[in-house]
Image (spheres, rainbow, N blue to C red):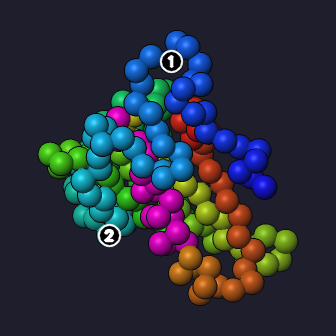
């Protein structure tokens, strides 16, 4: 049914004026080969880092964050993403072939009592440089960490809070 409602625009009928932007093949979910690729992604657990290493980690992530977003101080970024008060925090750090950080995805799990029941609140935020977007690396990361949690806590109410502040989150 969805195939009859949502269809990609065939190349010959693309609206005039789109220019030579890289075409994304929505059926295969792959970016064109000409776009830079994320070479590797590493999961970091911030509370396992020594204080000096954590500060260096914050600096490196914040540099990329400033290239993607505006208006957040380093301290606010550090508190919200790296030093979250969540019971569990993981950050998937994306690097290019040169080893430079080009994006990240943070996943926090807060455990709270809501309406008299133990509940989980999943919060996620991501920021990736424009040329490295695509490839669905963040979905795999979220599933890899959230599914085991859900299996360990069957029947627990779970809520999701996505920090979708960038327009690319909606595309």
Task: Point out the stretch of residues depicted in magenta.
Answer: 131-146
Residue 40 position within the rendered picture, expressed as x and y whole percent measured from the top left: 26, 58
Residue 87 location (% of width, % of height): 53, 70
**In screen coordinates, is 23 left or right of 16?**
left
The main secondary structure of the magenta stretch is helix
**In this rendering, does residue 133 appear at all?**
yes
> Measuring 29% from the left and 50% from the top, which residue is drawn there?
38
Q: Residues within 10 Å of mark 2 (few under 14, many from 20)?
A: few
Front in this rendered view, residue 88 or 166: 166
Label 1: how many Cα within 10 Å (few below 14, some 14–19, many 20+): few
Please state which of residues 41 and 53 is positioned toward the viewer in this rendering.
Answer: 41
Q: Mark 1 highlights which residue?
A: 18
Q: Which residue is mark 2?
A: 48
Residue at left 52%, top 12%?
Answer: 17
Q: Which of 33/89 is in front? A: 33
Image point 47% across, 64% down: which residue?
140
Q: Is residue 59 left or right of residue 25?
A: left
Q: Secondary structure at mark 2?
A: helix
Residue 139 versus residue 72 in the image, above or below: below
Membership of 25 in magenta stretch: no
Residue 83 shows in this picture? no
User: Which of marks 2 and 1 precedes in the sequence?
Assistant: 1
Foreground disc of the pair 1, 2 = 1
Residue 15 to residue 69: above or below: above
Q: Please say if 168 is above or below 15.
A: below
Q: State left or right for residue 165 relative to residue 60.
A: right
């Amino acid at each position: 049914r969805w195939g009859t409602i949502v269809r990609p625009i065939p190349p010959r009928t693309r609206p005039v004026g789109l220019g030579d932007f890289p075409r994304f093949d929505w059926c295969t979910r792959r970016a064109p080969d000409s776009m830079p690729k994320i070479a590797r992604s590493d999961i970091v657990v911030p509370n396992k880092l020594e204080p000096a290493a954590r500060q260096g980690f914050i600096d490196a992530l914040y540099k990329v964050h400033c290239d993607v977003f505006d208006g957040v101080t380093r301290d606010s970024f550090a508190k919200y993403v790296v030093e979250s008060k969540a019971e569990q925090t993981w950050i998937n750090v994306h690097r290019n072939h040169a080893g430079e950080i080009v994006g990240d995805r943070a996943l926090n799990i807060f455990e709270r009592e809501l309406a008299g029941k133990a509940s989980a609140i999943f919060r996620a935020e991501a920021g990736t440089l424009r040329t490295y977007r695509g490839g669905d690396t963040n979905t795999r990361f979220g599933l890899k960490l959230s599914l085991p949690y859900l299996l360990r806590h069957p029947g627990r109410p779970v809520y999701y809070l996505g920090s979708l502040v960038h327009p690319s989150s909606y595309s």
